[in-house]
Image (cartoon, rainbow, N blue to C red):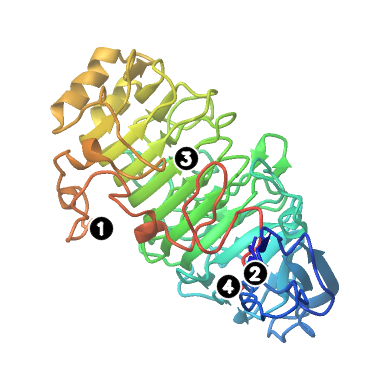
């Protein structure tokens, strides 16, 4: 709102004209400027108005791609940010292709979209690669989702100022809210790294490590058989950096929803950094087996677990923030290894799930969950340099189920939490005292701390006063130099989570790319 004040002195009379907003008085042809014809003396010139962002106009047409039958021009779609040309993706990318950023153009995912076809358990190399340029926006509805099949790759690399946005049709139309969810499927990356939950129910164990040399799994929730897994822990499914995935998690089948990002058997050759999940109706991210190394992960408003890791995944996560909505969400971390919880998988199946999380800030706000972190089934969990803000005095910071899980703990060091009545919780044969003993065996832990976080995620004096643990001892992924503080954000949200995130009532990052309920315009 601009204020225009002119002071005219006519003899002893003073007339003040102030507070006229551009949406209150508009003169045709002046773009909101107000021109008032006054008698002499000449009034002070009207200040130049702050320019408003022009509405987007549709691109002339769809670009040409190599895959047959190419992109389909399905007309235009109009929302609060303007009108866009809509180019529908083919059912399958069957050749190397690039989706360029073009002003006034959106790409539509309709139904299941495949990047290549499954190349098999024993394949090598990459068959098809899909590249997506910074600033591209892709949208979808209902059961639509994109799968990078095993043996193919994606190069979806945005930038800090121009993230790639995957979102819903309602978001384009401007009718999605800060509580909308389940409006489309999500993104799936599959690879040829080892998994433990073999779909044929023949498992590799310590006693019989080669019982199933062809162990693979099937993607849940799809009507078409979609296998993943292999023997190459360094396999690459491509690179996926500076991406926002909004409003995902549509139920593909009863009780089977996709996450914002689902990985299955992706290897350590896959690069996944700077990822934001916003309002997934299922988990924010879920890793089924494989080797996942990730830096700068933001999960905001997930309706189930924020981070779900299982099926023998080997994961290292650096600089992670999670903020739940108040009315929905389960655990912030649910960490499993193959167990005997009714799915027929033995508790000693290999590979054992293993995860280290370093420099994290978790804000539990859901009244539907009683713990922030839950590990069960025998996975190996390491937590370093973290801050956990639980919802109420009765909520637990860490819950451990089963003795096999307790024995597998890698270590907990330099972790603080504002727990009160029951900061740790044991279950399924584990006592609270046993969990507390594991915490006490670490260094610089305090699960009864008073937190001083500001702006939800930014460290205060209490967090910055905690001695930092050298996480390079846990994994070579946590390379020097370390950040030098606990938590994910020492003082400036934009340092790690700048303009590639979006803002909402749940978490305002101060991102220049704008609100999650709107599309960014460049």
Mark 1 vs 3: CB contact within 8 A: no
Task: Name the mark on residue 135.
Answer: 4
Residue at disc 4, secondary structure:
loop
Tell me the distance, in whole angstroms, between the alpha carbons under discs 4 and 2. Answer: 52 Å
Per the image, the residue denoted by label 3 is: 323
- Residue 267 lies, in percent from the top left, at 40, 60
- Which callout, 4 or 1, points at the residue further toward the start of the chain? 4
User: CA separation, marks 3 and 2?
Assistant: 56 Å
The crowding category of the residue bearing disc 1, from other C-alpha atoms within 10 Å (few below 14, some 14 to 19, many at least 20), is some
- Label 1: which residue? 477
Q: Secondary structure at mark 3?
A: strand
Image height check: is 367 above or below 190?
above
The residue lying furthest to the front in this view is 11
Quick one: 491 or 312, which is closer to the camera?
491
Residue under the image location 46 percent in, 75 percent down: 125
Which tag, 4 or 3, sits closer to the chain's start?
Answer: 4
Q: Which residue is mark 2?
A: 9
Assign a secondary structure to mark 1. Answer: loop
Specify the quadrant of the image occupied by residue 88. Answer: bottom right
Residue 252 screen position, x and y as percent? 72, 45
Characterize the local packing of mark 2: few (<14), some (14-19) or many (20 or more) Cα atoms within 10 angstroms: few
- Contact check, label 4 and label 2, Cβ < 8 Å: no
Number of on-image labels: 4
């Amino acid at each position: 709102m601009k204020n225009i004040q002119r002071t005219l002195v006519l003899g002893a009379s003073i007339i003040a004209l102030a507070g006229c907003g551009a949406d209150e008085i508009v003169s045709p042809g002046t773009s909101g400027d107000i021109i008032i014809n006054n008698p002499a003396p000449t009034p002070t010139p009207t200040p130049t108005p702050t320019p408003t962002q022009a509405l987007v106009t549709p691109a002339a047409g769809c670009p040409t791609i190599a895959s047959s039958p190419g992109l389909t021009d399905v007309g235009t779609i109009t929302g609060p940010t303007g009108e866009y040309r809509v180019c529908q993706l083919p059912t399958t990318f069957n050749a190397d292709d690039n989706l360029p950023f073009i002003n006034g153009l959106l790409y539509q995912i309709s139904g299941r979209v495949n990047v290549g076809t499954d190349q098999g358990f024993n394949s090598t190399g990459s068959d098809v690669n899909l590249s997506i340029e910074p600033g591209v926006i892709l949208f979808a509805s209902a059961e639509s989702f994109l799968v990078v099949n095993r043996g193919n790759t994606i190069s979806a690399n945005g930038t800090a100022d121009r993230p790639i946005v995957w979102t819903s049709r309602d978001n384009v139309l401007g009718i999605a809210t800060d509580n909308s969810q389940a409006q489309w499927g999500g993104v799936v990356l599959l690879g040829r790294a080892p998994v433990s939950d073999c779909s044929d129910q023949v498992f590799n164990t310590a006693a019989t490590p080669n019982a199933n040399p062809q162990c693979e799994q099937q993607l849940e929730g799809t009507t078409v058989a979609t296998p993943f897994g292999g023997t190459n822990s360094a396999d690459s499914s491509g690179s996926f950096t500076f991406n926002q995935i909004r409003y995902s998690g549509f139920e593909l089948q009863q009780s089977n929803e996709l996450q914002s990002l689902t990985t299955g058997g992706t290897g350590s050759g896959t690069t996944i950094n700077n990822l934001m999940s916003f309002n997934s109706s299922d988990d924010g991210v879920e890793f089924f087996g494989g080797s996942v190394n990730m830096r700068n992960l933001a999960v905001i408003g997930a309706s189930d677990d924020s981070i779900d890791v299982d099926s023998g995944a080997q994961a290292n996560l650096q600089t992670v923030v999670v903020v739940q909505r108040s009315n929905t969400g389960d655990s912030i971390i649910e960490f499993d290894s193959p167990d005997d919880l009714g799915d027929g998988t033995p508790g000693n199946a290999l590979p054992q799930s293993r995860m280290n999380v370093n420099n994290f800030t978790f804000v539990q706000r859901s009244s539907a969950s009683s713990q922030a972190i839950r590990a069960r089934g025998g996975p190996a969990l390491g937590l370093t340099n973290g801050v956990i803000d639980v919802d109420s005095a009765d909520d637990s910071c860490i819950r451990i189920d089963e003795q096999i899980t307790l024995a597998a703990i890698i270590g907990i060091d330099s972790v603080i939490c504002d727990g009160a009545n029951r900061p740790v919780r044991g279950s399924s044969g584990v006592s609270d005292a046993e969990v507390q003993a594991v915490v006490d065996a670490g260094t610089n832990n305090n699960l009864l701390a008073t937190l001083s976080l500001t702006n939800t995620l930014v460290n205060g004096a209490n967090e910055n006063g905690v001695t930092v643990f050298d996480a390079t001892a846990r994994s070579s992924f946590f390379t020097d130099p370390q950040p030098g503080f606990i938590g994910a954000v020492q003082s400036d949200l934009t340092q790690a989570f700048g303009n590639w995130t979006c803002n909402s009532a749940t978490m305002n990052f101060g991102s220049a790319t704008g609100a999650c309920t709107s599309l960014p315009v460049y």
